[in-house]
């Protein structure tokens, strides 16, 4: 399945704006179908570059999360409820969502307590409004999205021979930027986990 996603990504990369729209649609389908979005996120950096890839993944992952949430809320509610029985922590998260709403959604996106795809469906069991859910998910996923797209962009440039085009100093700065991004994502995730634990315990 990862090979199929990689092939689809390579196909979209050569189609201009139409390919970018196709990428967003493929990402949404991947979210709904429990396919590994990390492959597409990394691939977006390699195929579209850092900033374009970041924007595309940010839009696509948010729309995909919303689509999966709606499917879980209106079409697969009983199935999702059964799956949630395997994750006792979600009962506490669900209770916290009832009182805190978008704040808990944002914290779980910054520091996930459940697998991304399953979490999307799980929020369908809550009463969080779609607007709050979409905004909190979009903002909360940004640090992780940027990190993975950055990794993909660096790998893509190296594969295309970018190492010969950049000086050692430029690559040192690029590596430092990657390290800083990873550190920032880790710090944000740790703080989010601490805040989430306090809200869930409350």
Image (spheres, helix red, strand yellow):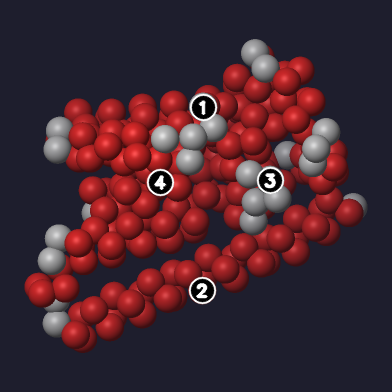
Real-space Cα separation, disc 1 to disc 3, in angstroms = 16 Å
Q: Residue 33 carries which label?
A: 1
Label 3 crowd (10 A; few <14 / some 14-19 / many >=20) = some
Residue highlighted by disc 4: 39
Q: Viewer-nearest of labels 3 and 2?
A: 3
Q: Residue 114 carries which label?
A: 3
For this view, does 167 lie left or right of residue 143?
left
Residue 36 vertical placement versus 30 (above, below): below
Residue 137, picture quadrant: top right
For this view, does 185 lie left or right of residue 179?
right
- The reply to whether residue 51 is visible in this rendering is no
Residue 193 vertical placement versus 128 (above, below): below
Q: Residue 46 or 63: which is nearer the viewer?
A: 46
Q: Viewer-nearest of labels 4 and 2?
A: 4
* Rendered-image quadrant of the N terminus: top left
> Residue 126: percent from the left, percent from the top?
75, 29
Query: Which residue is painted at 56% across and 50% down in the image?
Result: 140
Real-space Cα separation, disc 2 to disc 1, in angstroms = 31 Å
Real-space Cα separation, disc 4 to disc 3, in angstroms = 18 Å
Residue 110 vertical placement versus 84 (above, below): below
Mark 4 touches mark 3? (CB < 8 Å): no
Mark 1 touches mark 4? (CB < 8 Å): no
**First reached walking from the N terminus: tag 3 or tag 2:** 3
Residue 19, picture quadrant: top left
Label 2 crowd (10 A; few <14 / some 14-19 / many >=20) = few
């Amino acid at each position: 399945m990862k090979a199929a996603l990689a092939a689809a990504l390579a196909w979209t990369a050569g189609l201009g704006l139409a390919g970018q729209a196709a990428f967003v649609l493929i990402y949404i389908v991947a979210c709904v179908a429990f396919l590994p979005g990390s492959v597409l996120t990394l691939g977006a950096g390699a195929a579209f570059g850092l900033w374009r890839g970041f924007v595309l993944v940010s839009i696509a992952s948010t729309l995909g999360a919303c689509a999966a949430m709606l499917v879980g809320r209106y079409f697969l509610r009983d199935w999702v409820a059964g799956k949630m029985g395997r994750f006792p922590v979600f009962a506490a998260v669900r209770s916290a969502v009832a009182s805190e709403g978008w704040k808990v959604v944002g914290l779980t996106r910054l520091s996930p307590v459940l697998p991304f795809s399953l979490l999307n469906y799980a929020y369908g069991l809550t009463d969080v409004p779609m607007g709050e859910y979409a905004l909190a998910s979009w903002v909360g996923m940004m640090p992780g999205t940027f990190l993975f797209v950055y990794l993909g962009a660096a790998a893509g440039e190296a594969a295309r021979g970018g190492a010969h085009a950049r000086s050692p100093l430029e690559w040192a700065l690029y590596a430092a930027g990657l390290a800083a991004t990873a550190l920032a994502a880790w710090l944000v995730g740790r703080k989010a986990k601490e805040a989430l634990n306090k809200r869930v315990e409350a």
